[in-house]
Image: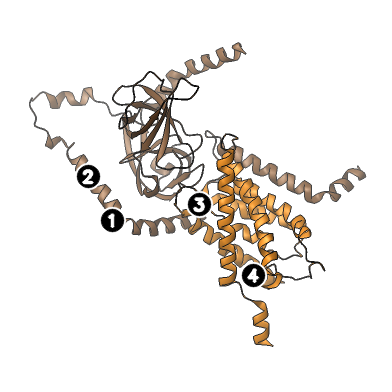
Chain colours: A brown, B orange
Amino acid sequence: MRNLFLFLWKYNFFILFLLLEMLCGYLIVRNNNFQRASFINSTNEAAVKVNSVVSAATEYINHGITNDALSRENAGLKTLMPNVYYVDSAIRRSINDTTLKQQYTFMTAKVINNSINRRNNYLTLDRGSLQGVKPEMGVVCPNGIVGIVKDVSDHYCTVMSFLHKSSLVSSRIKRTQFIGSLKWEGIDASHALLDDIENHVKVAKGDTIITTSFSSVYPEGVLVGIVDNVSPGKGSTFQNISVRLSTEFGSLSYVYIVDNLFKDEQKALEKPIEEEQKTLEGSKR
Amino acid sequence: MILKIARQFFRFLILIAIQVTLLNHIQFSGYINPYIYILFILMLPVETPKWLLLPLAFVTGLTIDMFGSSGGMHAAASVVVAFARPGVLRLIAPRDGYESETKLTPHVMGFRWFITYISILVLLHHVTYFYIEVFRFSEFFVTLWKAILNSAITVALIVIGQYLFGRSSKRNERIIG
């Protein structure tokens, strides 16, 4: 026992180093795990305060651009107002309520902190559990997708940006309806890679890419981007499709948090299938 | 003693503030993100006990992690730097060793010594951090390039900062004396 203590004392520096690195490793793994909440995140008060000041400064500088974007969006929304349409039948109003059931609600939120220059980027928004934000809700902006809510505090939430190594968005080529998965390659914040589109599918430069409702995070049909470059995959059956993202991650200031009211239902229904596939894969090995 | 600790704490606050409010928000080409907060660990006095370096580095890294939602990545990289610091100091020690209460600034230690010391540890920090961040071998060379490029920028920023804000103690002595 004495020798053990002598040993520990002799190498105290190295042992302390190992202990701290193990603690860091634990924190990192815990942070990467999407389902579990992490301790070290930017929803704490000090971080939020400092980040708000910085965001207020950048927001002031970007006022003009934001105003433009908001007024453009307003114009778009105004064309959707009921009074724009000519009512051609009297019955329409009465059946409206029974045929349409609201599936998504949108909540505006202000971006307090945002980054695009790291491999794994996060945003902080000024909405939290008191406003009804829950983890795994989708976040979109007027031009496209933004990310998925990760941690939630009373008044704030952090969002795993699409610009993250583990983000994968199920998306569809609007013209041909083929489905692939979109991921970010790490350097260029304005481009992403559309994977899982087979070589025989004809994809043209300029095709629009939209979301699917498979993941139950984003509503179906949200604009994601436009095909920029297509090349046949080397040694694989999938094409390399480079997509120009429609979201400008560098200048986000107001976003919408999407709540899918049917999400639990969809998840509960799909759960047995996922479990079955897992057991099948297990039995193969 | 209290004054010394206060000075270190002040440096800690300034560096964290610069890192969090300015450098974390550079949005230029997706490549550039220098981390100068590590200077706090590099500039701690020579006589700082070894065991104290590690927790100080851990806390520094964790503070940066808190602002950027990066888990414990900065903490991990900072602790590596703190672990390597005594070895590096020994490796590049001047011929007659360090006098106690030596300040590790270019004004005291000389420009060449300072830039060697800073470069080794900043490169170590950036390489560690960027590899932890990516955690994938498929992006090996991109990550290496990123680490080297950003180390160069960090070192440049630190040197510029030293000459702009670092007080030349010799000159002060002359004025006082």
Alpha-carbon distance for marks 3 and 1? 26 Å
- Quadrant of the snapshot with the C terminus of chain A: top right
Q: Residue at label 2?
A: A74
Compared across the picture, whether A23 is left or right of A60 comes to: right
Sequence-first disc among 2 and 1: 1
In percent of the image, x 60 and y 15: which residue is there? A282
Q: What residue type is labelled 3?
A: Ile
- Residue B127 at x, y = what percent? 62, 47
Residue A154 in sight in this render? no
Q: Residue at label 3?
A: B32
Q: How crowded is mark 4: few (under 14 residues within 10 Å), some or many (20 or more)?
A: few
Alpha-carbon distance for marks 2 and 1? 15 Å
Viewer-nearest of discs 3 and 2 = 3
Q: In this view, does A27 lie above or below A68?
A: above
Viewer-nearest of discs 3 and 4 = 3
Q: What element carries label 4?
A: helix
- Residue B67 at x, y = what percent? 52, 52
Alpha-carbon distance for marks 3 and 2? 36 Å
Q: Do labels 2 and 1 share a chain?
A: yes
* Chain label for disc 3: B
Asked whether disc 3 touches disc 4, contact meaning CB atoms under 8 Å apart, the reply is no
Q: Could you say which is closer to the camera, residue A29 or residue A38?
A: A29
- Quadrant of the snapshot with the N terminus of chain A: top right
Q: What residue type is labelled 1?
A: Gly
Alpha-carbon distance for marks 4 and 2? 53 Å
Q: Residue at label 1?
A: A64
Q: Residue at label 4?
A: B7
Compared across the picture, whether A141 is left or right of A25 comes to: left
Q: How crowded is mark 3: few (under 14 residues within 10 Å), some or many (20 or more)?
A: many
Q: Do labels 3 and 2 share a chain?
A: no
Q: Which amino acid does label 4 sit on?
A: Arg
Q: Residues within 10 Å of mark 2 (few under 14, many from 20)?
A: few
